[in-house]
Image: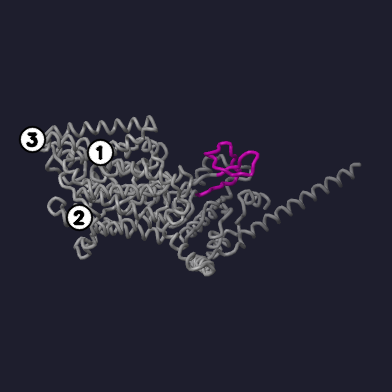
Amino acid sequence: MASSNMETCKSEHMQVDIDEKNSLQDKIVRSQWVLNAPEPPSPLHVVADSVGKTISKVRDRFFSMTDQSCTTLLLSVLQGIFPILGWGRTYTVAKFRKDFLAGLTIASLCIPQSIGYATLAHLDPQYGLYTSVVPPLIYAVMGTSREIAIGPVAVVSLLLSSMVQKLVDPTTNPLAYTKLILLATLFAGIFQTAFGLFRLGFLVDFLSHAAIVGFVAGAAIVIGLQQLKGLLGITHFTTKTDIISVMKAVWESFHDPWNPRNFILGCSFLVFILTTRILGKKKKKLFWLASISPLVSIILSTLVVYLTHADKDGVKIVKHVKGGLNPSSIHQLDFNNPYVGEVAKIGLVVAIVALTESVAVGRSFASIKGYQLEGNREMVSIGLSNIIGSFTSCYVATGSFSRTAVNYAAGCETLVSNIVMAITVLISLQFLTKLLYYTPTAIIASIILSALPGLIDINEAYKIWKVDKLDFLACSAAFFGVLFASVEIGLIAAVAISFAKIVIISIRPGIETLGKLPGTDLFCDVYQYPMAAKIPGVIIIRVKSALLCFANANFVRERIIKWVTQEESKGDMKSSRGTINLIIIDTSNLVNIDTSGIASLEELHKSLSSHGKQLAIANPRWQVIHKLKVSNFITKISDRVFLTVEEAIGYKTEC
């Protein structure tokens, strides 16, 4: 009986040894899977493959088109360029009824706003109206958004005037100033079109969400302060945009005789516009009240001034507004101008800011309606709108949030609402501009001021503060840069901080120690999951970066050595077999590695080996393992490369 039990025990021990041997062999095989992974494609192969796929798509499309008739082929090409030919087929009278009402509604808001924004850009009022005619018509046949309303906007108007007036003074040489504005518009349109054609939309993302929130808020305050000129009836005012210069100009104006009638008239209608806006928010059916209140303000204030002859008592008025169709401005585009290089830079900055606003507005309302906005096509359509606009006396146009919101609330169905708006503005230019002669400038200022509260989003700024302090720093830099320096400095500061954030994250990536979660095969950060158990004699480290490169390699190496030293000094990793003898680097996060990264790993291996410790690599990507093999680093660490962290630990134990 005893001999029988002994034989059973021996057979069980033999079976365990066989199972352990098989398990070890399986792990060796899986380790070879990692080491024998196929080489990643070379950069040349990637480029060639991309070009080949593009050519293949073009060839397939071409052959599919050859089977079509010439009429169908032409219609297909035109439909790709002009989306209106596609959705126009299913357009109905019911949709037109909604678009017609929406177009009239946004026109009632657009006309006074366009005059005000042109004044903000230091242009004659008619240029704002011109910009509300041609660009919306071009966008209507080429755009992909259904709700967006195109025209001049406050932020772009301020940006243009603040930069161009540094080259030419609009008060002393208005003709030369206007020419530079039109040239900047042409450059902006060219850049926007190029972004779309070459799929460079990522350039717009250089202005982060946080930077835009701060920039727009700062610009809103600056715009508001500049409207004090019209609201107070100040004759001489600073051309600078920073808050100190503006407040100084306002303070100095109080020492000169000024007429309080401008202030009373402007504030009265400002209260009226804001009251209708509050009513429109409380009762959704009264949204139209807030939309038409600016136009009503212009009509009523003009009648008041005309009937009371208030202009003779010191109330400043708009006076002559040139009417008629958009005149050609091709002859005004002077490429021999000595400032053409500076104007091109201005065009680039304005192009990015305008696209950022337009794409953000379009995507917001597209998500509400449940469809996708084609970003690159949007850029092309906005760009061509501005290119053609620069030929027809228009300055930079883009998607307006306030008018788009009104367009959406008015129940627009398609871009026909933009066509209705443009035709309405065109009729006003043709027949109604003489009626604007007695319009007080204080009303224009009050209309612009009424649009500014929506640009200052305190709740969003607070949310950014709670979520990411570095993002809030970029937001603050844009805000205070615009407020106390200039629009350009605010933008540059915000972009610089955003880039600095990327650099800091790249050169100082996080490093975490992993432990095994009880009852699972998962290895997680021991600080995030305190219940995760550390493995005796082993440190498992994961680098929280997609790239181990020259920027962060030395930092990572020093952190790992420091970490190992600290863990040993604590004594909490000691076991019956001694101190730490294996360091496993989980490279599952690493997408790529460069020569500096490999050199740092080699130095780490030497440092650990000199202290009797081993280095192992777990779960490398194929780009990483390929470079480690080519550099002979795998041989130096005795092929200690494993499919998973658990297998690296198990292999050590079994060996």
The residue to which callout 3 is attached is 257
The one nearer the camera, 24 or 36, is: 36
Residue beneath the point at 57% across and 61% down: 634
Residue type, mark 3 in image: Pro
**Left or right: 343 as drawn, with respect to 105:** left
Q: Which residue is mark 2?
A: 178
Write the residue at 45% across / 42% down: 368
Amino acid at circle 2: Thr
Secondary structure at badge 3 equals: loop
What's the mark number on residue 447? 1
Residue nearest the viewer, comparing 139 with 71:
71
Q: CA distance from mark 2 to mark 1?
A: 24 Å
Rendered position, 631 above or below 211? below
Residue 314, placed above or below residue 342: above
Asked if residue 42 shows in the view, the reply is no
Please provide percent x and percent y for residue 181. 23, 55
Q: Earlier in the sequence, mark 2 or mark 1?
A: 2
Amino acid at dot 1 = Ile
Instruction: Inspect the magenta stretch and tell me whether residue 537 lies in it.
Output: yes
Q: Is residue 614 above or below residue 242?
A: below
Q: Which residues are magenta?
A: 514-543
Q: Residue furthest front?
A: 93
The relative height of residue 516 versus residue 607 in the rendered view (above or below) is above
Q: Secondary structure at mark 2?
A: helix
Q: Main secondary structure of the magenta part?
A: loop
The residue located at (87%, 43%) in the rendering is 5
